[in-house]
Image (cartoon, rainbow, N blue to C red):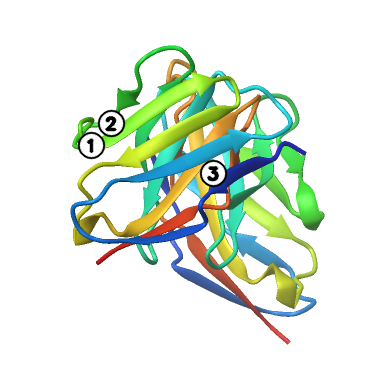
Amino acid sequence: AQSVAQPEDQVNVAEGNPLTVKCTYSVSGNPYLFWYVQYPNRGLQFLLKYITGDNLVKGSYGFEAEFNKSQTSFHLKKPSALVSDSALYFCAVSFSGGYNKLIFGAGTRLAVHP
Amino acid sequence: GAVVSQHPSRVICKSGTSVKIECRSLDFQATTMFWYRQFPKQSLMLMATSNEGSKATYEQGVEKDKFLINHASLTLSTLTVTSAHPEDSSFYICSAKEETQYFGPGTRLLVL
C-alpha cells in the first residue's frame, strides 16, 4: 500500500536555528514527492517537489528537501528558521500510475520560538 | 504562481439543506481537480477526483449521491453537499492540477 509517514506531530525550534521536518514514504514505482504548508484556516501552499534529477530540491521561502532513495525519505530543511515559518507542514507522495492522486502524511506542526 | 479560488470561504446552513462550493483555477486550465476534506488537527482526506466533461471518481467510503461533483469547464468544479447534516461540518479544500496540484483556500462548512 502507498503511504507517507511524518513521525513527528510537532517540531520546536528556536529562531535562527536550522530546522528539519521528517518524511518517509512507501510506494511502488517511482515516487513524486511534495511538501506543502498550511496556515490556520487556509488551504495548502506548495513549497517544493521532487520528480526526478537532483536529489536536493530548493523551494519557496528558503526551504529545501533531500530525496534519499535508499532511506525512502524526503526531509524538509531550512538553514535558519523564522517565527513566521510556524505552521502545519504536509509531506505528500504521488506515484507513476496513480493518476496523480496525492497521498498526504498526517502533518507536522512547526513552532519557531523567538 | 498558479492561483485557485474557492467560494464561499465560510458557510453556515441548517440541517437538511444543500450547499454548493465552487472551485476555480484563475490563471490556468485544469482538466483535473480534486476535492478534499480536513477534520480539525488532521490530514487531508481525498474525497473525489473531478475530470472535466466526465463523471467524478469517488474514493472508497465517499457517498457520491451526497457529495455531488460537477466539472463543467476547465476552470470550474463544484461540490454540492446535499441534505447536509451536522456530521458534514468540516473544512473542504479543492485543488487544481497543472503540473503540480495547487490548492484553494478552503471552505469551512458548519451545519446546524
Q: Splitting the image into 4 quarters, where does residue B20 fall?
A: top left
Give me the residue at 50% from left, 63% from top.
A108
The kind of residue tagged 2 is: Glu
**Residue at far bottom of view:** A114
Q: Splitting the image into 4 quarters, where does residue A70 fall?
A: top right
Give me the residue at 37% from left, 65% from top.
B40
Tell me residue A50's x, y (percent).
65, 33
Q: Secondary structure at mark 1?
A: loop
Residue at numbered disc 2: B59
**Label 1 crowd bin: few (<14), some (14–19), many (20+), radius 10 Å:** few
Give me the residue at 71% from left, 35% from top.
A55
Disc number lying in front (1 or 3): 1
In the image, is B31 to the left or to the right of A5? right
Residue at numbered disc 1: B62
The kind of residue tagged 1 is: Val
Q: Chain of mark 1?
A: B
Residue A89 in view here? yes
Question: CB atoms at circles 1 and 2 under 8 Å apart?
Answer: yes
Residue at numbered disc 3: A73
Q: Quadrant of the N terminus of chain A?
A: top left
